[in-house]
Image: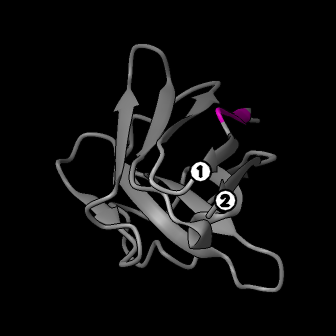
Amino acid sequence: QVQVVESGGGSVQAGGSLRLSCKVSRFSSYPYCMGWFRQAPGKEREGVAGIYNGGGSIVYGDSVKGRFTISRDNAENTLYLQMNSLKPEDTAMYYCAVDGPYRCSDWAPGRGFRYWGQGTQVTVSS
């Protein structure tokens, strides 16, 4: 069983920044996708960003391109999400997930990710 724990959420004003962290008990050496997702009340889950081990490909949801950056620290088994220029519509519960589709193929819906964290709340006020 892989443990996934998110942290770093909070409340911020529009235009501000937050950095989310996702500590994973182990990173797979296989190029499974690791990703960030979010879900606001009454809305479907949305893929925010994905990255896979061993490759250079990073994918982003259209609504966060140019504002959010996903990165990983293999030595620390930690995934990060730097969120800049935050907007009220970014308000959601943010989830980290690992062991997802090979090389992040069809990653955005979140299907096929084996391990998920409990989530961390991000609230952006106008």
Secondary element type, mark 2: strand
Residue 99, label in figure: none
Query: Mark 1 is on which residue type?
Result: Gln
Residue that carries the numbered disc 2 in the rendered image: 125
Reply yes or no: does residue 121 show up in magenta. Answer: no
| Residue 66 horizontal side relative to residue 106, left or right | left
Q: Nearer the viewer, residue 126 or 73?
A: 126
28 up-or-down from 51: above or below:
above
Locate residue 88 relative to residue 115 in the image: left or right: left
Identify the residue shown where x is 39% and y is 49%: 84
Q: Position of residue 64 (x, y in %)?
A: 39, 67
Q: Quadrant of residue 15?
A: bottom left
Residue 59 visible in the current orientation? yes
Question: Which quarter shows the N terminus?
Answer: top right
Give the amino acid type for the residue marked by disc 2 in the picture.
Ser
Tag count: 2
> Residue 121 appears at what percent x and percent y?
75, 50
